[in-house]
Image (cartoon, helix red, strand yellow):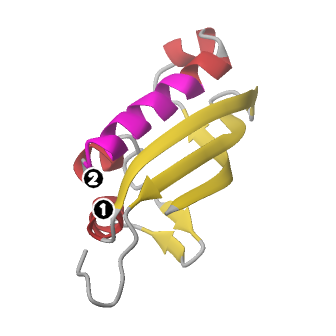
Amino acid sequence: MRMSYAFVLIAAFVTPAAADENLKQVVEKIASDYADNFNKQNPTGIAALYSNGGVLVTAAGPQADIAKYYEGAFKAGLDHEEIAVDQAQPLGADALISTGEYHITGKSCGAAQLC
């Protein structure tokens, strides 16, 4: 199973030092940390990348318990993600917006197979 999607990342910075860095490099670092945690199947590590009170917005709606959401994704068979950042632009003094693509792969779960 392979899924490919475009993404939009909106990030709010906690530290002013991040504003001095190249925005695309900042987003690439976040994306790399995210993919590393995803590929290690570390839902707690992924959740730690979100700000306190942050939510994951999916097609099913906002997900407040981010670690629990990814536990379910890994249990369903998703096991590898690749992320490519195309652009990053400022969105105010302490936030940015980014676009790019990601690809998620995993095993396909049939009715006879529990994942």
Closest to the camera, between mark 2 and mark 1, is 1
Marked residue nearer the N-terminal end (2 or 1): 2
Rendered view: 96 above or below 38: above
Q: Amino acid at mark 1?
A: Phe
| Residue 97 locus on image (x, y percent) | 70, 38
* Marks 2 and 1, how far apart at CA: 9 Å
Residue type pointed to by label 2: Pro
Q: In this rendering, is residue 51 above or below 4?
A: above
Residue visible at 36% across and 66% down in the picture: 73
In the foreground, 28 or 12: 28
The residue tagged 2 is 43
Q: Secondary structure at mark 2?
A: helix
Q: Is residue 51 shown above or below 89?
A: below
Q: Check disc 1 and report its element: helix, strand or loop.
A: helix
Left or right: where does residue 31 sit relative to residue 87? left
Residue 107 lies in the magenta-colored region: no
93 or 88: nearer the viewer: 88
The residue wearing badge 1 is 74
In the image, what residue occupies the spot 38% across and 40% down?
49
The C terminus, quarter of image: bottom left
Span of residues in magenta: 27-41
Name the dominant secondary structure of the magenta segment: helix
Q: Position of residue 70 (x, y in %)?
A: 34, 61
Using a 10 Å C-alpha cutoff, classify the residue at mark 1 as few (fewer than 14 neighbours), some (14 to 19) or many (20 or more). some
Q: Is residue 1 above or below residue 59?
A: above
Asked if marks 2 and 1 touch (Cβ < 8 Å), the reply is yes
Q: How many marks?
A: 2
